[in-house]
Image (spheres, grey):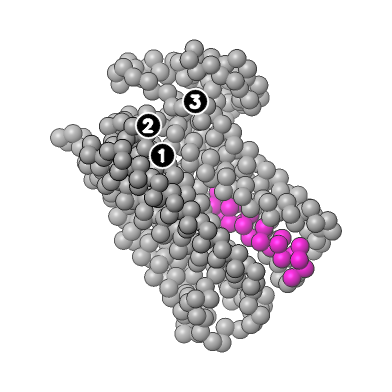
Amino acid sequence: MDVLDLSRWQFGITTVYHFLFVPLTIGLSIIVAGLQTAWHRTKKPEYLRLTRFWGRLFLINFAMGVVTGIVQEFQFGMNWSDYSRFVGDVFGAPLAMEGLMAFFLESTFLGLWIFGWDRLSPRLHLATIWLAAIGTNISAYFILAANSWMQHPVGYRIVNGRAELTDIWAVLTNSTTLVTFPHVLFGAFLTAAAFVLGVSAWFLLRKRDVSLFRTSARLALAVSLVSAIGVSFSGHWQAQIMTEQQPMKMAAAEALWEDETSAGFSLFAIGDVENGRNHVNLQIPYGLSLLSTNTLDGEVEGINDIQARYQALYGPGDYRPVVGLAYWSFRLMIGFGMVSALLALAGLWLTRRGRLPAGRWAYRLAIAGIGLPFLANSMGWIFTEVGRQPWTVFGIMRTAAAVSPTADIPSVAITLVGFTLAYAVLAVIEIRLLLKFIRIGPNEQAEPDTAVPALSY
């Protein structure tokens, strides 16, 4: 491996690891706010107990997300300094807005929520968790705006070999951002709902607080189903934008080598990348044309034709991503999401009219299903970033030109191993904290008449 490969591995590991915490934080923030709203309106003690229980788990995950996110940003200066110089004026703007507006909003009001149970009025205290949740979602929007600019650069000009911002509104309303944000948001709700469902199933399996976690499980199942539908529709819109803006990414996702009308959606393919063809390709007829163009006879560009066009446009080079990785990450993303949706449907059927499944298998499936959205999210990010290669900023800057010129193999390798080991330790801490507070269970106290110690969260 050279410095470029090691730097890409390091950024890939830190990004995927960080994104394990982000969707759960986004989704749990809304679920906790919704539960507290239900308690504020009904005064039913079970909603208060659920708010406090899920709030503890939300805060643990939020803290881990902050720590891993800070480490991720260090790499822009360490390993990708040429990228930072080239796009800092543009890329830095939404990130600065995220830090100065969204992060301060969520962290400030989250602190007020933690320590304000007996110090603020119920209505004002409820407002703090909603403002924290809104800040969390706004934070995601600004970060996605920065990433979307790398996928589809807008609102800039090149001056003296650097990209300079000319229209911040164009960056914030990038068409890529407008379809990516709802897709990520629905994916986050699906992740949080699967987590809530799996933990609730653990309690129901052991017959602890059955009435409490029956409510929790039903809420999670409803959120899962709605989120799965939202992920499907937003993913469809995202595929259409991707086909228009990054046709090579879509072609690689489908192992489509030649331009094709009425193109089928590939279910399983064995490809020959060297010769630009498939030996085996099982398809759903017309599926890809429908996904990409909303028509059964729409034309979708193939890898070989796009490669020839890009060589004429950008000069000699290989503009294909790693086709096998793009192809299978795309399929796994869809597959894990579909299984999550099926589990939600089955769960709603089994718990209809207040029932609970008699067999232990249903609860065990729900517990195992916690990991499905996490896997789907990870595969989605891998596909998004790998499919853009060889570009760091599509059509403007190649990844090979973005790496730090002063970085060397020993330093990158040492930090790669160091970050990986540190993240392994953090993973153990996160899991042990979550398991500890899950085993403790909800507080038996019905009314928040004493201060809530920070350590209890």
When asked about the image quadrant of residue 395, the answer is: top left
Give the crowd class for mark 3: few <14, some 14-19, many >=20 residues within 10 Å.
Answer: many
Is the Cβ of the residue at disc 1 closer than 8 Å to that at disc 2?
A: yes
Q: x and y percent of residue 179 in the render?
A: 47, 42
Query: Residue at (30%, 43%) from the top-left corner?
Result: 411
**Residue marked by disc 1:** 9
CA distance for labels 3 and 2: 20 Å
Answer with mark 1 or mark 3, whichever residue precedes in sequence.
Answer: 1
* Element marked by disc 2: loop
Find the magenta span and give its range.
187-208
Give the crowd class for mark 1: few <14, some 14-19, many >=20 residues within 10 Å.
Answer: some
CA distance for labels 1 and 3: 17 Å
**Residue marked by disc 2:** 1
- Asked whether 288 falls inside the magenta stretch, the response is no
- Asked whether 193 falls inside the magenta stretch, the response is yes
- Indicate the amino acid at tag 1: Trp
Looking at the image, residue 122 lies above or below residue 207: below
- Indicate the amino acid at tag 2: Met
Tell me if residue 181 can be seen. no
* Element marked by disc 1: helix
Answer with mark 1 or mark 2, whichever residue precedes in sequence.
Answer: 2
Looking at the image, residue 380 lies above or below residue 299: below
Q: x and y percent of residue 401 in the render?
A: 27, 32
Placement of the N terminus among the 4 image quadrants: top left
Magenta region, main secondary structure: helix
